[in-house]
Image: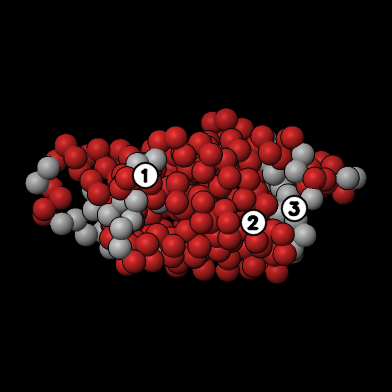
């Protein structure tokens, strides 16, 4: 893989992570139930990505094979469940603690690669992962009021850990879609998420003020329609660059893609 591709993947992921730093605040400030937020995020983000995909000419039947739709929907199920758990974690544990636990996802992704696909992981990779996580933990701040209900706090930590695991699962499934435009993958995932969550939404408690709607719209368009497409593309690039082929051999995969 060309170094320019790796730099682009790293830049996209860095930009997405900078934007994601405000997700917790928007979720808590919107005063919405986790299911409501996840649903509205799917609807608004999906609408944004539909416009992007249409403008780029991606909405062609040749790109939406049964295999692509099935794998993307499975990834969508994992990512939407991940959102619901993470949003629930914010209100139970502190935003910083939930974020710290959620960012164990790289460890889980590497662990799944080792356990399920027998991937080999270098000591340097583990060292960098550990250093990054230690740095994150150093900035964690837990409010005393949160600790006043220890059972709820531990529940929030468990939700964040579950969300991290589901994100790792979604990343593995996304890797299987190498060669499919990332924005199209994200669109299918969000459409599936909106349809799956629709029966469970509390329509009577949707945002009632312009401020709350502005927070939800920002979360849906900026943090989903724009950021989520960036993450999907960056995951494909960086996993391939790291040699995390998750059960696929890199060279045969390239041959298969080039023959279609």
Element type at mark 1: helix
Name the disc covering residue 258, or none.
none
Disc sitting over residue 59 in the figure: 3
Q: Earlier in the sequence, mark 3 or mark 1?
A: 3
Label 2: which secondary element: helix
Q: Nearer the viewer, residue 37 or 114?
A: 37
Disc 3: CA contacts within 10 A as few (<14), some (14-19) or many (>=20) = some
Q: Is residue 237 visible?
A: no
Foreground tag (3 vs 1): 1
- Horizontally, residue 26 falls left or right of residue 63, namely left
- Quarter of the image that includes the N terminus: bottom right
In the picture, residue 62 is in which quadrant?
top right
Q: Is residue 239 left or right of residue 86?
A: right
Camera sees residue 151: yes
Cα separation, mark 2 vs mark 1, equals 24 Å
Residue 245 appears at what percent x and percent y?
Answer: 67, 43
Residue shown at 11%/54% (left/top)? 144
Residue found farthest to the right: 259
Closer to us: mark 2 or mark 1?
1
Q: Residue at x 51, y 68 (%)?
A: 15
Q: CA distance from mark 3 to mark 2?
A: 8 Å
Question: What is the x, y in percent for residue 228?
Answer: 54, 57
Which disc number belongs to residue 203?
Answer: 1
Point 43% across, 65% down: residue:
218
Q: Residues within 10 Å of mark 2 (few under 14, many from 20)?
A: many
- Residue 159 location in percent, x, y? 33, 40
Name the residue carrying label 2.
Answer: 50
Q: Tell me whether circle 3 and circle 2 mark residues in contact (CB < 8 Å).
A: yes
Seen from the viewer's position, the closer of residues 65 and 140 is 65
């Amino acid at each position: 893989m060309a170094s320019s591709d790796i730099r682009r993947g790293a830049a996209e992921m860095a930009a997405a992570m900078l934007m994601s730093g405000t997700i917790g605040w928007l979720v808590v400030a919107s005063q919405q139930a986790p299911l409501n937020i996840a649903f509205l995020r799917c609807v608004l983000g999906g609408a944004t990505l539909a416009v992007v995909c249409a403008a780029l000419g991606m909405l062609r039947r040749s790109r939406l094979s049964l295999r692509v739709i099935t794998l993307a929907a499975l990834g969508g199920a994992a990512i939407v469940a991940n959102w619901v758990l993470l949003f629930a974690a914010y209100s139970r544990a502190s935003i910083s603690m939930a974020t710290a636990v959620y960012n164990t996802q790289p460890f889980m992704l590497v662990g799944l690669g080792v356990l399920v696909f027998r991937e080999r992981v270098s000591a340097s990779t583990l060292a960098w992962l550990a250093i990054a996580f230690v740095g994150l933990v150093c900035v964690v701040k837990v409010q005393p009021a949160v600790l006043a209900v220890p059972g709820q706090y531990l529940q929030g930590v468990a939700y964040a850990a579950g969300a991290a695991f589901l994100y790792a699962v979604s990343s593995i499934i996304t890797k299987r879609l190498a060669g499919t435009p990332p924005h199209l993958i994200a669109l299918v995932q969000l459409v599936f998420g909106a349809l799956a969550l629709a029966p469970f939404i509390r329509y009577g408690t949707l945002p009632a003020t312009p401020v709350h709607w502005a927070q939800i719209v920002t979360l849906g368009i900026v943090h989903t329609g724009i950021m989520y497409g960036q993450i999907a593309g960056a995951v494909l690039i960086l996993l391939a660059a790291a040699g995390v082929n998750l059960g696929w051999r890199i060279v045969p995969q390239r041959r298969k893609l080039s023959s279609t």
